[in-house]
Each structure stands twice: as structure tokens, then as C-alpha cells.
Image (spheres, rainbow, N blue to C red):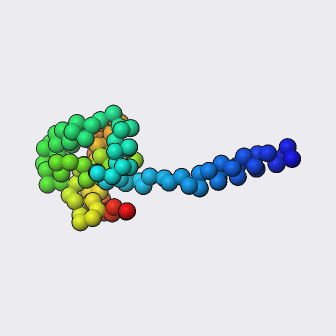
Amino acid sequence: MRRHLPLVFFLAALAVCSGCKRPPANVFPGSEYYAKRVETFKISPEEAYDLALEQAEADNKLQFLSKKPTVATKNSYVFSMPQGSGASLQGYHVNGKTGEVRFFSQKKTVTQTR
């Protein structure tokens, strides 16, 4: 019985976590997951906008900048143009923990899942 103890613990943990729901990689404003993700960031959405605006003005790419984040990825706010029920990842990404701003030209759209 003793040699099976690790297996018993593993199966118990698996049974408990089978009901766990992982948050999606990309979360949208207004969702519970977005609120929880933003709580982990050191930078507020307003501060992130100011940082993105400063960089967009310097890059002369204001057309890619929304006034509010369109989505939050694992570590970043994304300021881009809304795309129907989703958001374009082409735009300014502001790291919510460090404040680093990067422009992504990748024309990928993510959609909101319900």
C-alpha cells in the first residue's frame, strides 16, 4: 500500500482539479477573468494608455491606438482596433508588470469566448 501512496495522491489531486477552469489566454474588458488578470498587474489601464500614447505619437501610429485596452494577454494590455466580437492583436502591447511598450504588426484577431 505504501508504494501506491504517491499514485493515490496524484489521482486525488487530479480529481480535485478536474473541476478547475483555467482562464483563457486572452481576456476581454468587462469579464471576470479580465478583472482578475488586471489585479495582478502593477500598471493600471490608464497608466498603460498613457505609455502607449507616448509611444504611438513617437512612432506616428496613432491609428492603431484605442483609448481603452481591447484585450489583455497573459502579461500585457493590448491597445488596438476592435474587430466585431474580438480584438486585433496588431497594435500596442503594454506589459502590465513592467510598463514596457511594444508595437505588434501581426494581423491576428482573437475572439471572445463565452
Q: How many marks?
A: 0
Quadrant of the frame with the C terminus:
bottom left
Name, please, the residue furthest toward the right: 1
Q: Position of residue 101 (x, y in %)?
A: 27, 42
Image quadrant where residue 26 sits? bottom left
Residue drawn at x 85%, y 43% as measured from the top left: 2
Q: Position of residue 76 (x, y in %)?
A: 33, 45
Can residue 55 be seen?
Answer: no
Residue drawn at x 37%, y 62% as measured from the top left: 113
Residue drawn at x 20%, y 58% as measured from the top left: 81
Image quadrant where residue 42 sits? top left
Q: Position of residue 31 (x, y in %)?
A: 33, 52
Residue drawn at x 23%, y 64% as measured from the top left: 83
Can residue 20 be seen?
Answer: yes
Q: Position of residue 86 (x, y in %)?
A: 28, 62
21 left or right of 81? right
* Foreground residue among 85 and 91: 85
Image quadrant where residue 80 sits? bottom left
